[in-house]
Image: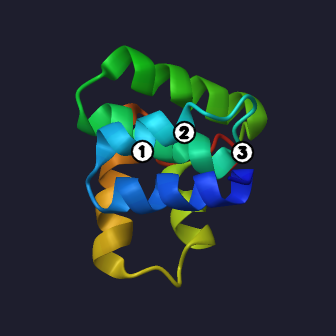
Amino acid sequence: MPNGIFGYWTARSTNSRRYKEAIKLGKRFQNPPLTVLENLAASYARLDCNREATEMVKRILSVKPDHSIDSFTTGYAEVDEKVLTHFVEGLRKAGLPEKSCGR
C-alpha cells in the first residue's frame, strides 16, 4: 500500500475515533509526513499516552517550528467543523502550542 494511502487511512481512523488503528498505521512510516505526525499526536493524546503524544509534538515542531493550533485550523478551513474540533482537541491535549512564537 503506498504511503499516501496509509496517511489517508491514518487520518480517517483518527477522525473515526479508532485511535489504536491510527497509531498502528502511522507507525508504518519510516519518516512520517507532518499530517501523519499530527494524527499520531492526537491519537496518542486521546488514549492518554502522554509521553508518546509529547514526543509526536516535538517531532512536529522539529519539522515545522512555527506549527500551532492556529496554523493547523487555518490550513484545514474546509474540513467539517465537528471533525476539526475533535482533531484540534486531540492536538491541544498532546501539547501543540495554540499560537506560534512569531504570531
Residue name at image x 37 percent, y 53 percent: 14
Callout 1: helix, strand or loop?
A: helix
Q: Earlier in the sequence, mark 1 or mark 3?
A: 1
Is any part of residue 30 visible from this angle?
Answer: yes
Q: Position of residue 98 (x, y in %)?
A: 46, 47
Examine the rendered structure and indicate whether residue 67 appears above or below residue 61: below
In the rendered image, which residue does mark 2 sit on? 26
Residue name at image x 47 percent, y 79 percent: 79
Residue name at image x 35 percent, y 61 percent: 15
In the rendered image, which residue does mark 3 sit on? 33
Left or right position of 101 against 94 = right
Q: CA distance from mark 3 to mark 2?
A: 10 Å
Is the residue marked by circle 2 packed among few (<14), some (14-19), or many (20+) residues within 10 Å? many
Callout 3: helix, strand or loop?
A: loop
In the rendered image, which residue does mark 1 sit on? 22
Q: Position of residue 93 (x, y in %)?
A: 31, 38
Examine the rendered structure and indicate whether residue 72 appears above or below residue 100: below
Type of residue at label 3?
Answer: Pro
